[in-house]
Image (cartoon, helix red, strand yellow):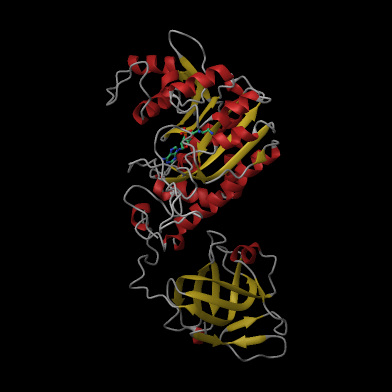
Amino acid sequence: MLPRVVKTCARAAGNVSVCGAIRHYCKRNNAPRKIRVTEALSGTEVGTRIKVQGWVRSVRPQKDNLFLHVSDGSTLQLLQIVASPELNDTLLTFGSAVEVTGCLVKSPNRKQPVELQADHIRVVGECNPVEFPFKIKERHGLEYIRQFPHLRCRTNIFSALLRIRSEATAAIQSYFRENGFLQIHTPVITSNDCEGAGELFKVEPSGHHVTEKEGESDGHFFSVPAFLTVSGQLHLEVMSGAFPGVYTFGPTFRAENSQSRRHLAEFYMVEAEISFTQSLEDITKVMEDMFKSATEHILARCAEDIHLFHKHIAVGHRQNVDAMLTRKFNTISYTEAIDVLNRSSQTFTFKTDWGCDLQTEHEKYLVNHCGNIPLFVTDYPYDLKPFYARDNQDHPRHTAAAVDLLVPGIGELCGGSLREERLDMLGARLAQAGLEDSYQWYLDLRRFGSVPHGGFGMGFERYLQCILGVDNIKDVIPFPRFSHSCIL
Ligand code: 4AD
C-alpha cells in the first residue's frame, strides 16, 4: 500500500540535520534501525537513527513542536515523538497507524527516559477519530470494549491482558518443562466424551460427503461420530503409560448452554498426568506449584500490565494475589465441606446435602470460610465423578479420589483425580455406563504395563481471572465463544 502521507524534514547540515526547532544528533548516513517501542524506551539505542511503527495515542501540536505518543503493543508505555510542526498533518489522528523515523535522544522530561526526534512521519493507515469507538484519554470499561472484539486490542487494558496471557502461557510451559514433563499435542477432534457429561460439539463436514465406495457410507466422515475435545485427559493417560509426567495445553470445547461469568464454549485448558502415584497429594502439589510458579513469573515479567488491572479493574487485588502466593493452600474433604455449609448461617439457593454437587455459591463460601486462600476439596461422592475416577472403596459414604481446587472470587479452578487403574473395577464401571465396547483401548492401558496414575486440568481463563481480578471470563480471552455468540 502506498503511504498516504509522508512528511520529511529534508534539510541537513553535514552529519547533523536541523528541521524546524528540532536538532538531530544522529548520523544520517546510516539506514535507520527498525526497533520496538520497548527497545527504544530501554535507552540502549540513544544516539541512533531508528524507525518505529505503531499507532498514535495522542497528538499535541504546539507552536514550536509537534508531540505525538505512539504505542506498538510491545509495552504499556508510549514513546514520545517530538517533531517540527511542519510534519503535522490532518491525517495524523488518534488511532492512525504511523511509521516514524528519527534520532532517539535522552528526554529532557523526567517522566520518560527517551524521546524520538522525528524527521520523517508516514501515516500508514488513517483512522477517523470520530467514528473510532475508542476516544482519546478516555478509560473505557471492559464491558464497553467487549462490544468491539475486532478492535479492543487497541486499548491499553486489552493489550495488557494479551501480553499477560502470552507470558502466562510461556510461564506454564516453562514450569512443566523445568519439572520434567513432556508436552503432548492431544487431538482437538476425538471420538470420546471424556467427562461423560454429553456437552459435546459434533464434528461433521459442512458439505455433502461422499465415501470412497458410494453406497457404503455410514454417514460419518470419520466412520464414527466425532466431537471437539472436552478434555485431553484420556490421550494423556495413553502417554502416561510410557512417560512419568506429560502435559497438554490447548483449546477445549463444551456445549454448555451457559452465559455465566466463568463458562465459555471454547476455552484453554492446561492438563497434566503423573505416573506412578497413588496419592492425591502428588497431584495437588503440582497444581499448587504450577499456580505459584506461573504467577510469580508473570508478576515479575508483566509488572506494569498487572498493576493496570489491580489499579483500575480490581482495586486492591494485588494483596489477595500475594496472600495466595505466600500461604500454603488449604485442604478439606468434600464431607467436611458439606458439614461447613450445613453449619453456616448463610442461605444457599442450591441444596447442600451429602451427594449434591458443589455449586459456585458453595465454592465461594468455602474459600471465604477457609481464609480466602485457594482450597483443595478432596474425595467427592463416587457418583458425582466420571468413570475414570478411582474408587476409594469407603462404603457406605462411597467416594472417589478426586480433587477440585477452589480459588477466591471464582470457585473451581482445577479438577483432577487419581485414575482407576484396577482393570476389573474399571471394566465394571464402564459396563455399568454402557461404554465397555468403545473403551476397550482404555481398558488395554490397564492390561499392558499399567501403573497407578492421576492428573488434573486447569481452566486457563479462570486462572487469568483469578490473578487479575477480572469478573467476566469473556474479558480474558481474545475471541470469546459462548452460547448465542460466535463473533468474527
Ligand atoms: O473439572 P474439569 O471438567 O476436568 C476435566 O476436564 C478433567 N478431565 C481434567 C483432567 O483431569 N485432566 O475441567 C477442568 C477445568 C475446570 O476446573 C475449569 O477451570 C475449566 O477446566 N473449565 C472451564 N473453563 C471455562 N469454561 C468452561 N465451560 C469450563 N469448563 C471447565
Above or below for 415 versus 30 = above
Task: Choose top left, top right, bottom left or bottom right for residue 146.
Answer: bottom left
Q: Is residue 473 visible?
A: yes
Residue 1 pos. (x, y %): 52, 82
Look at 29% across and 25% down and name the residue there. Answer: 350
Residue 167 pos. (x, y %): 58, 50
Furthest residue toward top: 396
Return the residue nearer the eye: 19 or 339: 339
Look at 55% across and 77% down and name the residue there. Answer: 99
Residue 431 pos. (x, y %): 47, 22
Look at 45% across and 70% down and name the residue there. Answer: 58
Return the residue nearer the eye: 341 or 397: 397
In which quadrant will I find the C terminus? bottom left
Q: Is residue 289 visible?
A: no
Return the residue nearer the eye: 216 or 451: 216
> Count the marks: how many?
0
Task: Choose top left, top right, bottom left or bottom right for residue 96.
Answer: bottom left
Return the residue nearer the eye: 315 or 351: 351
Residue 373 pos. (x, y %): 49, 28
Above or below for 120 versus 346 = below
Query: Would you say 194 lies left or right of 365 here?
Result: right
